[in-house]
Amino acid sequence: MPIEFTPWPESEAIRYRNLGYWEDKPLTDILKRSCEKSPNATAIICGERNFTYADMDRLSDNLARSLQAKGLKPYDTALVQLPNIAEFYIVFFALLKAGVVSVNALFSHQRLELISYAEQLHPSLIIASASHPLFASDDFLEDLNRKVPNLEYVLISGDCDYADSLAEYLDSQGHSDELQPTPPGEVAFFQLSGGSTATPKLIPRTHNDYLYSVRRSAEICGLGPHTRFLCALPAAHNFSLSSPGALGVFDSAGTVITAPEPEPMNCFNLVAQHEVNMVALVPPAVSLWLKAAPDHREKLSTLSLMQVGGASFAESVARRVPGELGCQLQQVFGMAEGLVNFTRLDDEDSLVFCTQGYPMCPDDEVRVVDDTENPVAAGETGLLLTRGPYTTRGYYKSPEHNELAFDKDGFYITGDLVQLGSNGYLRVVGRQKDQINRGGEKIAAEEIESLLLNHEAISQAALVAMPDDLMGEKSCAFLVSCDENLRPVLLRKYLRNLGVAQFKLPDKFKFVKKLPLTSVGKIDKRALRNELLKK
Ligand code: OOB
């Protein structure tokens, strides 16, 4: 059964095809094309291991065929959680080849996030890593099996005695019928939403829409076989996967070098060793790189392009990038739902340092509106709405939330407050959605508040952003509690035990007698944020 998703109106679909945005090819075309053109070029360097395009094709074929031989069928779904290793990409293409629709959880995700994805998707397959605490034993899988009865296959990367080994599947040539991706107009895989709701939402991405966004991003960034891209942000994130990310690099027959995280010393060594010329970072990582760079400038000599996105990037820091890191800066403002904006490589400095660029596609429609949904004047602050050939029209199986997140014309309500200049360039100036952007990692306030409210001693909870020099924002939980002995350390432990990702744990707790309310009786988060600013 095809995977449900909200389609684009037929008239738009025809237009996007006529304009050449939708090629009606599967995402596997990325690998196919580069494999035909340069089978022996290095696609991935992962630690001591190198993989050519031919290797990637063969290994992903092996996995797809082995899974098919075991009984996995097109439109089955998979939950994948792998760190930044070559297998992440091989699995990604293998599942696409077999028509299995996957979601890639971040490696920082824990039990609650994985269970939520599994309950939404009912995966028949899990592929995970023994290096993640959840998969060190089969306890979590037993838990998951009770919640998701149709889970049939588990493949684990690394040492594991309770499930099949991913490495064996990659090595074995399972005989099976022709491999068939899902049709290009249908869902290829799911992206994760940063979210503002209690349950993290899944974003259906079709082959057509995603392939366009990858190819157009690669074109804007001038990618080619010469590109040597360091993937140091989570491989699954839309930025490092497709803007143009690793997929853009594969499409251009370049090389992806994987790093577990953006920590500067290791990354600098990788840049030097593998002659990296491009990297994508979030703002806090840039600050760490700037701090570490003076003693290691020579290691960065091949770096020519640094993309920065995911969270607000201070102009004062942006201006330091070319001089202190010796490379060109590109700002990227994107979202897993679709729309991605870039400053362009030939833009003048003032645009690169002070704006977040403009949309990649001439047919990306952006509207900046006020509280009454009327357009604001050029340069004025308003809420950004968007629709276009690669922006989703709805979250997976979320009719009620979709009513709120999309307007009647199908525009996605981003929740971002922006200014649109008369030159078409956007500046992100704030946020309306109830989310904390912790250095690019998104925390839905409601998700953490509802967990806190389940605590027997807490009667009211509000999670708000507080400014932080390095991360841009951190989170602060305001709580009303009847227990005077409740301590932050106990609350963190409580949340951790519930199985929530570490980055979502509040950085600070403030116990108050009551929470301020707005005139309509909602918790006044603006007042809470202002209170933090005063300190
Ligand atoms: C990227 O994707 P998500 O889905 O993790 O987060 C999207 C949200 C945006 O709505 C905005 O609130 C914020 O992250 N954001 C930025 C930004 N880039 C993203 N805020 C200020 N300045 C920026 N440059 O974060 C993402 C996806 C693709 C490419 C780049 C980033």
Image (spheres, rainbow, N blue to C red):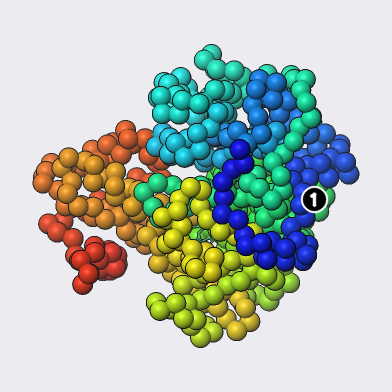
Q: Is residue 161 above or below residue 183?
A: above
Query: Which residue shows up at 72% across the image and 66% down it?
Result: 15
Q: Is residue 165 left or right of residue 21?
A: left
Query: Which residue shows up at 45% across the image and 50% down it?
Result: 398
Q: Find out if the beta carbon at label 1 lies less than 8 Å from the nearest ligand 1 atom.
A: no
Residue of label 1: 252
Query: Which residue shows up at 37% across the image and 35% down it?
Result: 499
Q: Is residue 145 visible?
A: yes
Q: Is residue 291 above or below residue 531?
A: above
Dot 1, crowdedness within 10 Å: few (<14), some or many (≥20)?
Answer: many
Q: Secondary structure at mark 1?
A: loop
Q: Position of residue 350 (x, y in %)?
A: 62, 77
Q: Is residue 12 above or below residue 145?
A: below
Query: Which residue shows up at 61% across the image and 38% down it?
Result: 1
Q: Quadrant of residue 13?
A: bottom right
Q: Quadrant of residue 530?
A: bottom left
Dividing the image into 4 quarters, which one contains the C terminus?
bottom left
